Amino acid sequence: MTSRKRATTLGVAEMVAQRARQAQAIGVDGIVCSAEESANLRAILGRDIALVTPGIRPAGSAAGDQKRVMTPARAIAAGSDYLVVGRPVVAAADPKAAAQAIVAEIAAAS
């Protein structure tokens, strides 16, 4: 059986964990993952790998086309190191105010 066939029998959480361990084994410095996976990956990988998390939405923001979103504070609490925030800022009526609010939420969570 090929590794591709074995991978298809894994659930999402198991496959993410497997791929993260493989990345760590070859010396990758960071991975991109959903904030929903951050806590589990942090427990598996420790602090040696940076977790980069897209799909960050401030409280009350629409999810848009993202299926797996989380607020900045919850993502940080889950173990994310770097947060990717795009549309909540660029699509805001006042992008500067939106960015400042997100920065304030991050500062309060840190």
Image (cartoon, rainbow, N blue to C red):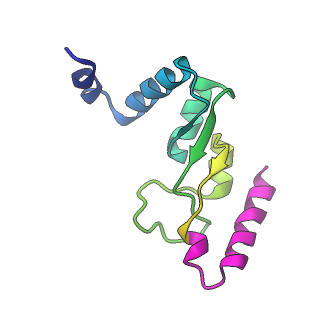
Q: Is residue 107 left or right of residue 74?
A: right
Who's the residue at 19% across and 14% down the image? 1
Above-or-below relation of 90 to 29: below
Residue 60 seen in the current view: no
Q: How many marks?
A: 0
The overriding secondary structure of the stretch rendered in magenta is: helix
Above-or-below relation of 20 to 96: above
Above-or-below relation of 17 to 58: above
The outermost residue toward the top is 1
**x and y, in percent, of residue 28 in the image:** 57, 27
Query: Dividing the picture into quarters, in which one does residue 39 lie?
Result: top right
Who's the residue at 51% across and 39% down the image? 37
**x and y, in percent, of residue 59 in the image:** 61, 67
Q: Is residue 7 left or right of residue 97?
A: left
Above-or-below relation of 37 to 27: below
Query: Dividing the picture into quarters, in which one does residue 48 lie?
Result: top right
Give, as a single range, the part of the protein colored magenta. Answer: 88-110
Query: Dividing the picture into quarters, in which one does residue 80 lie?
Result: top right
Who's the residue at 50% across and 46% down the image? 34
**x and y, in percent, of residue 88 in the image:** 57, 71
The outermost residue toward the bottom is 93
**x and y, in percent, of residue 4 in the image:** 25, 25
Who's the residue at 41% across and 57% down the image? 67
Nearest the viewer among 18 and 40 is: 18
Magenta stretch contains residue 103: yes
Residue 57 seen in the current view: yes
Magenta stretch contains residue 74: no
Q: Is residue 71 left or right of residue 4?
A: right
